[in-house]
Amino acid sequence: MKTFQSLMLVLLLGLCHMSTAAVEKKSDQERSTYIVHMAKSEMPAGFEHHSHWYDSSLKSISDSAEMLYTYDNAIHGFSTRLTAEEARLLENESGVLSVSPELKYELHTTRTPLFLGLDKSSDLFPQANSASEIVVGVLDTGVWPESKSFDDTGLGPVPSNWKGACETGTNFTSSNCNRKLIGARYFARGYEAALGPIDTSKESRSPRDDDGHGTHTSTTAAGSAVEDASLFGYATGTARGMAPSARVAVYKVCWMGGCFSSDIIAAMDKAIDDNVNVLSMSLGGGMSDYYKDNVAIGAFAAMEKGILISCSAGNAGPNSYSLTNLAPWITTVGAGTLDRDFPAYISLGNGKNYSGVSLYRGNPLPGTLTPFIYAANASNSTNGNLCMMGTLTPEKVAGKIVLCDRGQNARVQKGAVVKAAGGIGMVLANTDANGEELVADAHLLPATAVGEKNGDAIKSYLHSDPNPTATILFEGTKVGIQPSPVVAAFSSRGPNSVTPEILKPDIIAPGVNILAGWSGIVGPTGLSTDSRRVAFNIISGTSMSCPHVSGLAALIKAAHPDWSPAAIRSALMTTAYTAYKNGEKLQDASNGKPATPFDYGAGHVDPVAALNPGLVYDLTADDYLNFLCASNYSDMQIRSVARRNFTCDTSKKYSVTDLNYPSFSVVFNADRPSVVKYTRTLTNVGAPGTYKVSVSSVTPLVKISVVPESLSFAEINDKKSYAVTFSATGSLPDTGSFGRLEWSDGKHIVASPIAISSSG
């Protein structure tokens, strides 16, 4: 299924899709938005403030252009509307580093705390008073402040260093904030400059969430505990975020027409200034070089301020090289399943039953078997099997259950199409694009989703029986589903398309069928025809896994306030698991086979272990800048990222393999020797001890040696370095080879995944 072909599917699955934001130009004289990066240190002496200099630079090439935003923290520069010719002229002005077109981004629990072990280990986690000093900032579609997940009972005063605000606007006032939801801002200048004024009859020009996505992600990260939460009785239990005592600040950057980078940068700029501790962004970055990626540049500025940035990996899986948000200073999160399911069986007239999933709750089908038809046989359209709008013939559908193939349009919309044509039920069948992965939906009519194999079997019955019949049986909620987790088929995969030597994603977390808070003005399907209203909704995507890690990072930050973002990410990565308790490797939902580090990175997050990792791989801003030197970036390109002067040392030999990353991606190609060396430094964050190394590899074609083989740490913050040499002795398989490097003192296991590939 091509997930980017439907806006609704994008909203449900958090697909990170990027396109140029400029509207089709009728002539070169029409203006579009540009992001302008300035060398702030080169401001001429005659200007009192850098904003005056920016304005003067802009006026030198255009009398009519005005600045949309000036940026002080995330980047140094401004955004403005220019013609293509004006943009070219401005780029030649003194002090201008780059002028780039704005980009448009699209948006990519009750069981989760239990599944992650947070219920059994509450005594290990920081006390509420320290966790409540942590602020999680969420860039998304805004917030529904009336959600019980934002109840501030038991929380003390707002942290004294908080500088944020609760902005007023359509259907939103400062009184909508409290000691839980301590900040709410909205950013629409870029959006309105591109698409015109916001129609407040359709969406709120304020922090209010008219979509649901932003409320879902923010409550996943740090929602307060709410008892008896469910969606129509499904997944009933206590819903709470990963860091239920942390504070929440929302930054609305996504609107009906998308999320515009000028607004996103402005929100990051404010979030940095507001003093958030964690920044959660379930929206797309690109696959461009880091100096061209404004989100990556803003994330670099946040990292320098000690803010951990968690981003969704994207939902373009299981295709290789499909990841977004690739910068090594961003924590890139893929998606896995929970051990919870919502079974709904299709029972056929031939006596056979096939399993599926559904979140439908409403009037049941008749107690008897009902006429059943394949959508392709109820349509005059060539793609009638997909149940697109207007393709079904009502006379052939009325009173029947209809089988629709997955693809093209949103899953829930297919049900709406069947219902509008007079159908009374739907079976949604996966094709080879989705295989056996099942995502549950709150359909508008009795419906169930089945995997490709079951779908093929059901279609065979439809083709062979002259009078096919069926019914659907809904079984509610089942837990203890095994194996779990498995890597979600939609979760984007490596290798890293920008820097193959940096393994991405970093980690996976729960992202399938996640229950969290929802907007009170939109139904659970998001369809305009859905009049149902719910306090909680169950949706899927890396948009859901990202805030899990954001909330867990907040917990670790509360327990270890002096840890850097790199140290927190290292703790999450080196304690992640890659096998089930029976020793079998984590599976890939797309094919049922063992998953690899290109699918799950370091593995599935284990927050209890991450609180006490023993050792961490730490990184500073200068380490990342040295990495950019190794990537052969020019001084000007590095300045765009660093927002300050930084010159690579011509006498120094830089290597991307020296970035102190908690994982290893080893690339052999024709331009490189058959021996590759990596250096790493470990910092002790636990008791003194001696750690010994062990290496496992699935291929004898690469020899791996580690020097030294043991490291002794005498005190906290003690640092010790080691080198790993990879020697290729033969041709590697196209699919790559994988292994694992572990340091252990008998109490801790500090693990790093190894991915070995060849190119060229």
Image (cartoon, rainbow, N blue to C red):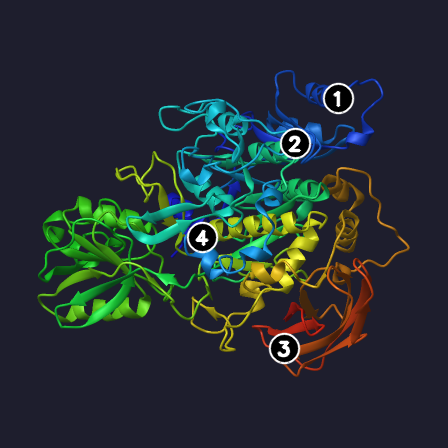
Frontmost of labels 2 and 1 is: 2
Give the CA separation, mark 2 to mark 1.
34 Å
Give the CA separation, mark 1 to mark 3.
55 Å
Query: Image height check: is 594 above or below 120?
Result: below
Please report the residue visible at 78 percent of the width from the left and 76 percent of the height from the top: 709
Query: Image height check: is 89 above or below 508?
Result: above
Give the CA separation, mark 4 to mark 3.
33 Å
4 or 3: tag closer to the N-terminus? 4
Q: Amino acid at mark 3?
A: Leu
Disc marking residue 53: 1
**Residue named by callout 3:** 732
**Residue named by callout 4:** 541
Q: Amino acid at mark 4?
A: Gly
Frontmost of labels 4 and 3 is: 4
Q: Secondary structure at mark 4?
A: loop
Q: Count neighbours of disc 3 (C-alpha within 10 A) and say few if under 14, some if 14 to 19, many if 20 or more.
A: some
Q: How many marks?
A: 4
- Compared across the picture, whether 393 is left or right of 147 comes to left
Q: Secondary structure at mark 2?
A: loop
**What is the x, y in percent for residue 556?**
62, 52
Cβ–Cβ below 8 Å for labels 1 and 4? no
1 or 4: tag closer to the N-terminus? 1
Extreme residue in the bottom direction: 700
Cβ–Cβ below 8 Å for labels 1 and 3? no
1 or 3: tag closer to the N-terminus? 1
Disc marking residue 160: 2
| Res 106 seen here | no
**What is the x, y in percent for residue 756?**
65, 71
Cβ–Cβ below 8 Å for labels 2 and 1? no
